[in-house]
Amino acid sequence: MNDPLSDFQISFQHIDLLVPRINKGIQFILVISGELKIETSSRFYHLEEKDLLVINRNQLYQVVGRKNNRVMVVTISDAFMDYHYTAYRNSRFECYSREIDLGRDDMIVSIRKLLANVMISYYRQAESYRIEVKSYICQILLFLIRGFKVEGSALEKMDTDDLRLSQIIDYMEKNYDQMITLEEVAKKFFLSTGYLSRYFKQKMGMGFSRFLMNIRLNHSIKDLLYTTDSISQIAMNNGFPNTKSFSTLFKEVYGTTPHVYRENHYVQKEDSVQNYNKEDVLNFIQSPEIVARLSSMILDDQKSYSHNETRYERLPLNLSQPVTMKIKGPDHILEIGEIIELLKEDVRSQVLDVKRDLQLRFIGVRHLLSNTAIPPEVETDEEIPTTSPYFAIDRALGFMKTYELSLFVRVDYMDISRNEEPYFTKLTQFIRHCLQLYGESFVKQWHVMFYEPYYTGVDVKELQRVYLKLHKALKTMIPSIQVGVYMPFSFHNEKTSDHHEWQLENETSIDFIGYNANQNEVIDFKEIADNKFYLARDYIKEKTDKLKRYLKSNHFEKPLHLVSWNTLSGNTRYTNGTFFRGALVLKNVLDIANDVKTVALWINTIVHEEIEKDKRFRMDGVELFHYLNGKRPAYFALMFLKRLHGEVVAHGKDYVMTQNERGYQLILMNSTIINPYLSVEETFLQKLNKEIHVTISGIPKGEYQIRKHVFDKNHGALYTKWWNLNSKHGMDAEIIEYIINSSRPSLEIFDESIEEDWSFFTYLTSNAIHFFDIRKTY
């Protein structure tokens, strides 16, 4: 049946046989039931229920049907394509639902649904059906262009409106196995040899002989894949003058010999479609059964694919190329404020989660000797006191020792200077107590960092004196304990402050350097429309590099600890929650993984904001748990880093791939720096999404299980579910528990048989992380 819209041909058929023909336009063949076998010039396609195949313009094909098939055929004219898509003549589309790359299955499902809707709209013939049909067709073409386009050949570029040229190529396609010559064809079509030669090259972009050889080469591929004929027999059957000319052209085009190509690609023996009729054998069908079958197909396919315009990237990974990069994820300092926080059960539970899932080594504490942690001794007339000032802190330290965690203590100058001598007395007594109770092997793992902020009015010599006194007191009791300093460092001036330059003169008395790097420092959030957010993109990595160069220029090289940092977050809790930052967190830590010993993290939002109650919102650190006790994006992002292990075989700006004893692991990121205030604009965010076509060369042949973890704002972020489940009447325990338990990265599992290069597509939303575990099966 012909669609009243002249640009489209729509039909529902039972096909016994379609004789060889050159396709005009783009044709979609969707099998509703039964089976089809389609033969083109270069290969065979077997289609069963729900299978989809696209036939390109000017492609020669024939069809034989089996098992009482029902087939939907939609053809879109060259005129429609030329008018709406200027690159049409330079493109072809490789779309066969049985042989699509991983990540394209959702697109196939969506095209299938749209084709079903085309037919249903056409049969219903409602008032607006023409608009509906055209709308569906345009959506189908968007999927086809964005997901399955490849570079076209001379055949696709041919002008089918040129009747004489079409007749010449049709003759060549049907007689390619004969001894065709330019002179013979010119005579047959009443042209001079010279004119045909010039005319053919002008229209096809190549000479007559080369075009003929390409036709023969395409047909020879089919013989290599589906027959057991010898190479010389294949050359003869496809019109080549000899085996050498066939092999030479084959290697020029495919980069290998016909014999090797057959070994790597052989499918099975296949008989060509035999047709003795000169006419098609098919029936057009129109019945209520059609609508019922198509409707069920729409309902069966629950997946869908959004074809919003996105950035598209190709990512070729060649595992045979040597890689010098090594990744050792830094250990983490878990900041908990005061050490007595460890007496709380919920804090302990969170610490143990972090210990299990992240590379946790240190518990970061402040005000270690405060009266809250170690209360003053109670006066008593007992000969042997029955109370101990260390009762509470011992419970915390015992917990840490049990789980092999060390202390990272920040000692503020102000804590010492308020009452210096009693402070050092209390410190000495505490260290001796810990050595007595826990032994030197536990205490010597501690790190003590002397801290005074950038802007300070304390005299340089005074800071130096107090630090050296602290260093001596600790090293006298425990020579191997690590004592270091916090070094304020200016990103723009590329130096420390005048009040801290004394540190450069005391290298022998300083074991490590602590520093901060916060992307928010370079952004003025009062200017919502600020277009300079790109300055924050590599800020943490650049500041780390500048600090290393500064220290090296002063002949001062010590281990670095990033004790305070943040990705771009916005300066309200609202934007801090809605701006998903998973990839930013992971990328920033990956960027400095080989430069620092540790990276500090705050245990949760509550503890972080209680440290300095005068500030309503904290921007100086990354938190792992939310107020609801659910995991924040940084938790899952860094969990992927811990899972990544093995030797690095490929790496780049937004990806890293490793090889290990189980196979391979690949992390892909879509790290995006934008004004966080724009993160609530869904339309804007969609333009930041990215689709990557990954091709990996060098994976050994075999069967693999692919585990794909997706972490983005819809799979793992608390805020999205919190927003969707919120109510003006508040939240209760049931809702909170559901949000926490369901806010996790998603997991998909695929089985892949890898024979050569393995390619797949993956669609990343803004700041998404995709983690692929490519496991060899046995």
Image (cartoon, rainbow, N blue to C red):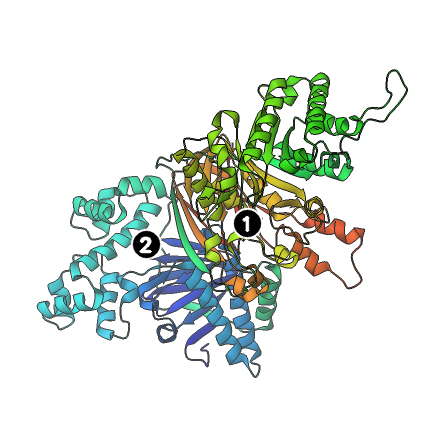
Question: Which residue type carries mark 2?
Answer: Ser
Question: Residue at image x 43%, y 74%?
Answer: 9
- At which x and y percent is residue 677? 57, 62
Crowd band around label 1 with a 10 angstrom C-alpha radius: few (<14), some (14–19), many (20+): many
Q: Secondary structure at mark 1?
A: loop
Q: Is residue 262 depicted above or below 714 in this figure?
A: above
Nearer to the camera, 408 or 370: 370
Q: How many marks?
A: 2
- Relative to residue 653, is residue 82 drawn left or right? left
Crowd band around label 2 with a 10 angstrom C-alpha radius: few (<14), some (14–19), many (20+): some
Residue 367, image quadrant: top right
Nearer to the camera, 506 or 312: 506
Q: Secondary structure at mark 2?
A: loop
- Relative to residue 64, is residue 482 drawn left or right? right
Work out whether residue 356 can be spotted.
no
Quickly name the residue at label 1: 567
Question: Which residue type carries mark 1?
Answer: Thr
State which tag comes first along the sequence, 2 or 1: 2
Question: Residue at image x 59%, y 21%?
Answer: 475
**Most extreme residue toward the right, as rendered?**
381
**Most extreme residue toward the bottom, as rendered?**
127
Q: Is residue 266 depicted above or below 724 in this figure?
A: above
Quickly name the residue at label 2: 42
Residue 71, disc? none
- At which x and y percent is residue 667? 49, 43
